[in-house]
Image (tube, rainbow, N blue to C red):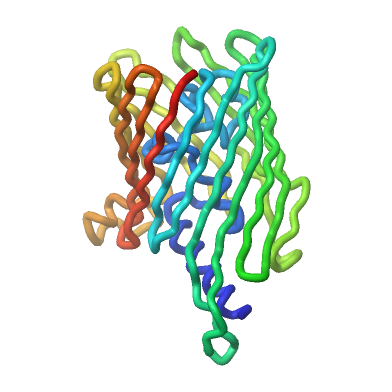
Amino acid sequence: MKIQIKITSSLLLLLLFPLWGFSQALVQTLQHPLSARGWSMGGASTAAVLDGSGLRYNPAITSRITDQWQGNLSSFVLDIMGGSAYTKVSLKGSTSLAAILSYMDYGLFTARDSDGQKTGEFNVQDISAGFNLSRALTEKTSLGISLSTFHAEMTRYSTNAVLLGIGALYYNPVSTFSLGIAYQNVPLHFSAFAGDTEKIEATLRIGISKDLAHLPLTLCVDLYRAYAGEYIARLGGEFHVIDHLFLRFGSSTRRFQIRSQQTFRNFLAASSAGIGFMHQNWMLDLAFIGLGDAGMISSVSISQRF
């Protein structure tokens, strides 16, 4: 049983690690973008203020977006499925609250003993729930705090965590420039599959966003420290084609670690594209993320502004 579990964990990590460079394999749900817009823009959402795609990365964004709800469904390779939902409401004064729920289902796996004999089947999944609390200090600055729980199950093994995050955001509505900084996934409590051999490290993120002056394009850039001291940069863009149509793209410095010269499919690895449609208070977003020869991730989101 232990041998099969170890192999399965490594396989899942290798499949999903090349694009996003997660800090830990255990908390992948907490590293995924919340929306198809976030996926299509390469996950560069630490300073994004147009929707809730950055709520997971920077809780200070909560007080800068309109009241809304959103549901998301993402399809990964090997029938791995994930989803998320959030709702954001304004409280008294300049305070806002957002509730976030996410899950990942890695599917059903065969369990074998040390002799390779089948002993049954088991499911691997994880779920996270939490909230953001944010307050606008001035017209341009806001602070936020997040608290989330994480639970993962792998046959008879499980892991649990309680994580804290803090963030700050500067946004100038005239120049449309925004700067976000956040310190996320600080473990207040953590019980791992294998005890002290597994750790969760907090992640420092810095992001900027700006509407270009002479082009209908919003650019977002994120920088953060990943696992083993590696620094990752993410770039995303959104073209405002017409009032209710948006085209998006994204990429990451992780692409330079993939042998992208071999095929056109590999050339697009760690890159993403998407489209968004808006009708009155409703928004539909689609995203596609290349994983080279491993396949792709697809994501769809629907949201409504109150």
**x, y percent for residue 295:** 32, 58
Front-most of residues 303 and 3: 303
Residue 157 in view, yes or no: yes
Residue 82 is left or right of residue 136, and the answer is: left
Quarter of the rendering containing residue 197: bottom right
Residue farthest along the left direction in this orientation:
264
Residue 101 is left or right of residue 209, and the answer is: right
Residue farthest along the bottom direction in this orientation:
115
Residue 228 in view, yes or no: no
Q: Say above or below: 145 vs 252.
A: above
**x, y percent for residue 275:** 30, 33
Q: Say above or below: 295 vs 246.
A: below
**Rendered residue at 77%/46% (across/down):** 188
**Rendered residue at 53%/89% (across/down):** 117
**Rendered residue at 46%/7% (across/down):** 174
**Rendered residue at 58%/53% (across/down):** 227
Q: Say above or below: 60 vs 173.
A: below
**x, y percent for residue 114:** 59, 88
Split into 4 quadrants, where in the image is the N terminus?
A: bottom right
**x, y percent for residue 10:** 53, 68
Front-most of residues 189 and 231: 189
Quarter of the rendering containing residue 291: bottom left
Front-most of residues 123 and 47: 123
Residue 252 is left or right of residue 293, and the answer is: right
Residue 292 is left or right of residue 158, and the answer is: left
